[in-house]
Image: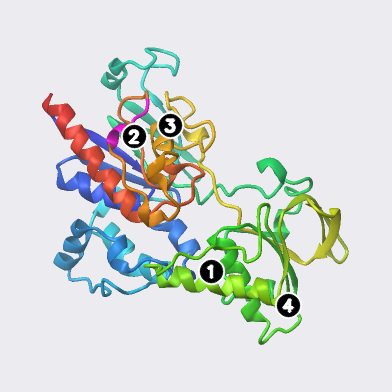
Amino acid sequence: MKKKRIAIIGAGPIGLEAAVAALDLGYKINVYERGEVADAVRRWGHIRMFSPFGMNVSMRGIERLKRAGDPLPDADAILTGTEYAAHYLVPLAETLGDSVHTNVEVAAIGRCDMLKCELMGSQERLDTPFRLLLRRGAREWNEEAELIFDCSGTFSTPNPIGDGGMPAVGETACKALISYGVPDIPGRQRWLFENRRVLVVGSGHSAAGAVRDLASLQDSAPETEVIWVMRRGHIPPYERIESDPLPERDDLLARANALVESGEIDFRAESTVLSLEQVQDGLKVTLADGAAGRETVVVDRVIASVGFRPDLELTRELQTRTCYATEGAYNLAAALLGEAAGGDCLSIPAFGAEALLHPEPGYFTLGMKSYGRTPNFLIRTGRDQIDSVLRWLAKDRQE
């Protein structure tokens, strides 16, 4: 059969690896990225990764860069996001030439001359190409493709900080004083936090990183204060993995635990944010504490390290099936909730293409977006997803 056109959404680690793999198999590809190449990675570029360089690249990509004469880091090097983008992702995108379209937003995806409710769950929908509405600035146009690899990730849609997963009262109005994710506290955003009182909300590695960086500011900016709020928590906040194969991760958790146990920061377990209000002295934040009831604190700034969620609006006109709890690919979400999930991201196996299928034939969610709100995704898992889907497509063509 004639090789089909694949539209790949996102020029991050998974989108670029998918493009390389598909192109090597003879597919016609177009990669659409609404920002610059590796846009999300650059935005957390100040953070040093837990895993070594060799875990975050493919042999296909390495061979391409070697042929292009690009120097490569050592396989065991622990890079920052900025270094990973500069030494691997950006050069890899350059080998793809004009197949990568930057500053182009995929605004919507549908089927040509077909509505969402027609031919429900039927393979006949595959006979009609996808239509993508693309946008660059004020200009809009359509392109078509037979297959969609949605590698758009979740980084652009952070979770709100309020109780029940909703925005806290006043959160939208106070967004100018809230930093979502892990801001560059030691570097270019230092001025926002030094000698300020900062509330950190979250329980994952991003929150631990923010707390560590804020505590480090106190050496040169001694008036810096930290309040750390966790919806579910205890002292110490993290259970470390014995003989952790990722030393950078273990160092972070050990430091965060030590800060809490020593009392160097104000740690509030079992606490949620109810409301925020901008006042003359900063932000008045109302917290709900399971033990003490409600309490109000006044801070200068909030760091919301509460995770991310997929943008489901993009595929509203497609017959997609997502988990009602995690918003990840439905079959994959069920597998992740099974016995194989374990507690450490390194222990989670890659699941085959069947776990990534949607009722919409030809549409695949790959990468972080396939996990939905489940946070323990690895880049190497995304590479395994790509290989599995391409093998599945090859088998489907042969049959």
Residue 40 locus on image (x, y percent): 46, 57
Q: Which residues are magenta?
A: 353-358
Choose the circle earlier in sequence order: 2 or 4. 4
Mark carried by residue 330: 3
Image quadrant where residue 197 sits:
bottom right
Marks 1 and 3, the one that precedes in the sequence: 1
Q: Which residue is mark 4?
A: 224
Callout 3 amino acid: Tyr
User: Residue 336, position in %: x, y?
Assistant: 42, 41
For the stretch drawn in magenta, the main secondary structure is: helix
Q: CA distance from mark 1 to mark 3?
A: 31 Å
Is residue 291 toward the left or the right of residue 321 in the image?
right
Residue 392 in which image quadrant: top left
Q: Circle 1 sits on which residue? A: 253
Element type at marker 1? helix
287 on left or right of 252:
right
* Badge 2 vs badge 1, beta-carbon distance below 8 Å: no
Q: CA distance from mark 1 to mark 4?
A: 21 Å
User: What is the CA distance from the residue labelled 3 to the residue labelled 2?
Assistant: 8 Å
- In front of the other: label 1 or label 3? 1
Question: Which secondary structure, mark 3?
Answer: helix
| Nearer the camera: disc 2 or disc 4 | 2
Q: What is the C-alpha distance between the residues marked 3 and 4?
A: 44 Å
Mark 2 burial class by Cα count in 10 Å: few <14, some 14-19, many 20+: some
Looking at the picture, does residue 361 appear above or below residue 189? above
Q: Residue at x 72, y 44 (%)?
A: 163
Could you say where residue 122 lies in the image, as x and y percent from the top left? 32, 15
